[in-house]
Image (cartoon, rainbow, N blue to C red):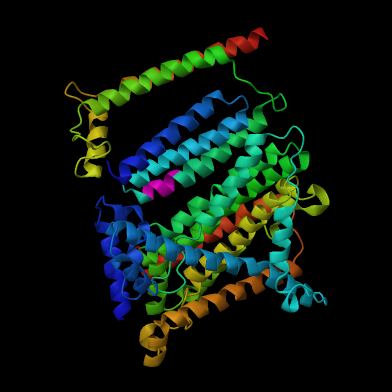
Amino acid sequence: MKSYTTSQKKYEISHIQYNYNFNRLFQWSHVMSDHQPFSAFIETLSGLPGGSGDLKTGLAIAISTLLLGTYIMILQLFGPYVERKIMARQQGRKGPYYVGWRGILQIPADLGKLLFKEDTMPENADRFGFFMSIYLIGLTSIMSFSPLPFGKDLMGGDMTVGILYIFAIFSIFPPAMFIGGWASNSKYALIGGFRSAGQLLAYEIPMFLAVLGVIGVVGSFSLETITEYQIQHGWFMFRYWGLGFVAALIFYIAGLAETERIPFDIPEAEAELVMGPRTEFSGWRYAIIMMAEYVHLTVNSLLFIYVFLGGYDFWPFPADMSPEFINNLRHNQIVQFVVMFFKFFLFVFLATTVRTAFPRMRIDQLLSFGWKQLLPISLAAMLGILWLEGVFV
Amino acid sequence: MDAFDILFIINAGFIVLSGLGVVFSERVMQSALWLIFSLVGVANVFLLANSEYLWVIQISVYGGGIAVLLLFAGRLTSNEEDHFVFDRNDFIYSFAIVVLMLANLLIYGLDSLPISEGNIYSTDDGNLLLQEFFQNIWQTDQGLGIILPFIALLFLAALLASVKLAIKEEEE
């Protein structure tokens, strides 16, 4: 209870306090609070003699953010390994086995190979577009980590626009992919780029509408505030007489389409388009594109967890219906961190199972499914959630 | 001059450079890419003015949605494969006219602002300054202000240009 009020207070401060000092440069200055694991480190570094205090604080915050970012990068590096292993088990194979213990170093080894490969570019490719699209794709995917909390206060930056920020950053992806496809000077890549942009546009809207109900109920875009609300009132997926579940399902389906994974991997349908917009990219460019895809999977899974599955919370019931020791455990940061770890790999498992179980859709089926079915249902679910919450009364 | 001023100047330079990139790229798709950069740069100005919400909306609507729209339009309407080049002379003239008009508008709006010395983007309160800027553009002592004639002139220029393009197509 106590930490929730602290969060509320901090949230208000972040709204009201508009001072143009050096700290404002680092959006992450809200990260500094009593509960933050990095705060001891930040305070120690700020207290060192010499130099400007603001600069040292900024440096300390930058280092802690870097640590968190590295953790997420390593986490998503093992996404493909877990996926390949589970997929192999489901198909009666062994999967990666020889590099490291049970093949655990297979993905870093693949990455090393890709980085040292020759950097080739097709003849007559547009140099500027070929380079810039990769740059944009890599940059935007890493930028999307910022507002994801891995425990209370354990995040890059508690922005007031949290979830909108992720949607905005991801909306740069379709034009970048499209330009990458065009710049490769290949028919496969161009058609793949068209499909990719059309698909991403079609599924962004139901995805956002599915979240909008939750945002309206909580009254905040911040993922941390949404999670804290769920600790108090129960997970959104199991509330509102099934409407929460409907919204969650739509969000998950649209998320799969946004990440271009198997039932929706039409842009890179191997049989027709080789690799879609990625066809001509090899070496480090391919590594960046693959990284961006798995970052999308990671961030979409994490968004689902934060919005519908209680975020770093492990107990789906409201605080006033739960025993006291469980409530205490819920506010323990180490427990929250571990819970996030397991929830993330649960979602990798889910995505892999979907990948092995479902066939690919056709492009027209996909687009009409998105626009004609998911969109109205998500709108209805959003209005229903808001109505049940009593917003319209 | 503090860190924000430096950031603002870097960002402004970025916007101007990418704007030039839009104009001077030979290929339509390259122009569109530069346009995305320029629009994202404009979004960063909102961030510097403490409007995170506008920043995010600008990126998702203009950097994402409008950019895809433009890219599709560029790809689907060009009849020559990859070699759609602007008629440079006409383009430069119309561009110069639009730039002059925009500069006029900007100077008019900025002229009557109470900007304190040594601070290029705000007085004590950034929001107030922006508000005053738009008020200056929208309404003056005489009545409707400068924005209406500006838009009228812009549309007139667009109309004339489209008439010229249509005549050219008929000649071909």
A208 versus A218 height, above or below: above
x, y (%) of residue A104? 70, 74
> Which residue does the image show at 22% across and 25% down from the upper left?
B111
Q: Which residue is depicted at the point 31% across and 23% down? A: B105
Instruction: Say whether residue A257 is visible.
Output: no
- Residue B55: say if magenta: yes
Q: Observer-nearest residue: A306 or B26?
A: B26
Q: Is residue B64 above or below residue A378?
A: above
Give coordinates of residue B160: x percent, y percent. Answer: 48, 13
Q: Residue A370: x percent and y percent? A: 62, 54
Residue A20 shown left or right of residue B69 in the figure: left
Rendered-image quadrant of the N terminus of chain A? bottom left
Residue B123 location in percent, x, y?
A: 20, 40
**Magenta-drawn segment:** B53-58
Residue A45: name its quadrant.
bottom left
Q: Is residue A332 left or right of residue A18?
A: right
Q: Quadrant of residue A49?
A: bottom left
Q: Could you tell me which residue is drawn at 40 percent across and 43 percent down? A: B44
Whether residue A356 is visible to the viewer of this picture, yes or no, is: yes
Q: Please report the residue visible at 53 percent of the width from the left and 13 percent of the height from the top.
A: B90
